Image (cartoon, helix red, strand yellow):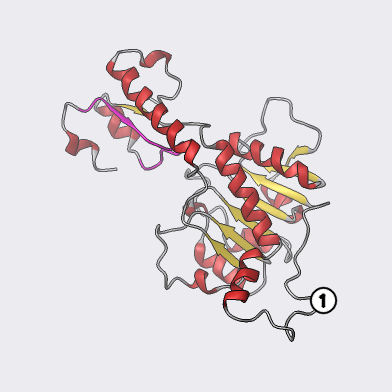
Amino acid sequence: NGCVPLAGPSLQVVSTLSAGHEHIDRDECRKRNVHVGNTPHVQDDAVAEFAVALTLAASRRMFEGANAILAGDWTLENWGICWMLGPELVGKVVGIVGLGGIGLEIVNRLRAFKVRSFLYYNRRPRMDPLPHDIQYSSLKHLLVNSDIVIASCPLNPESRHMFNEKTFRQMKPTSIFVNVSRGEIVDQDALYEALKNNVIAFAATDTTTPEPLPYSHPLLKLKNCIVTPHMAADSKETKVKTALMCAENILAVLEDKYRRNTSLLC
């Protein structure tokens, strides 16, 4: 945002290496007749894999256990029968906030862990038929009834700070919150307080505000919070695929074929 006017009148297309495009001033692009392209669905598998990995790492306290070894805390005195216990995924209810391409791929992978059922919240129910174990829900019902809440929704005015003090208090005290969406959907001060005061049990987030998150940020000091550096989509395969689609978006405009290109937003 703010860069489009600086590019001058020769600018014809802006193509981003991501599915998200909130960082592009599309209104300014439209005014200047500049086309905008993104790379939808290419990263769905990679982000879904990472969401499941964060879910497992949080529920089974993997990072906490690894850090305990590095700190010298794995001793015979500490290594009791209840040390580092965490819940299994078997029989749990998983809530997906944002059941798009990524959300569906998360569901497909979590079925292998024998979860009981899935609730999902979108701004409106999906019109396509879904398997019987996926049910549409209000956001409040999802938060109250889910053992694991995974955010995979786009950032927009409605979703900004969707997860705040009120919504965290609606979740179970044993619940796990996983974010592979955008950092701005979370009120981070509220998340910190919820984790510090055991309003929820654990959080694992791949996105923050700001990015990079300063090393001194209080979230990084909590044992019940995992923060990764916005890397969910960054597999070797997706980098190749997104680069190719990004180039195809540009060529579609330059070759006047943009009307047949579904990755161009305008």
Task: Confirm whether the magenta stretch covers residue 21.
Answer: yes
Instruction: Name the foreground residue: 212 vs 210.
Output: 212
Q: Residue at x 37, y 35 (%)?
A: 16
Residue 43: horizontal and vertical position, in percent?
52, 37
Q: Identify residue type, mark 1.
A: Ile
Q: At which x and y percent is residue 123? A: 60, 38
Residue ID at (67%, 33%): 125
Query: Is residue 151 something one can see in this rendering?
Result: no
The image position of residue 11, as x and y in percent, is 21, 28
Q: Secondary structure at mark 1?
A: loop
Q: Which residue is mark 1?
A: 81
Q: Is residue 236 magenta?
A: no
Residue 51 lies left or right of residue 213; in this view the side is right
Q: Against 137, is 101 above or below?
A: above
The answer, for residue 177, to whether it is visible in the render is yes
The residue segment tinted magenta is 11-23
Q: From the viewer's perspective, is residue 183 above or below residue 28?
A: below
Residue 72 position in % (x across, y down): 61, 81
Q: Which residue is depicted at the point 73% across and 49% down?
A: 94
Q: Above or below — where is 22 with respect to 57?
A: above
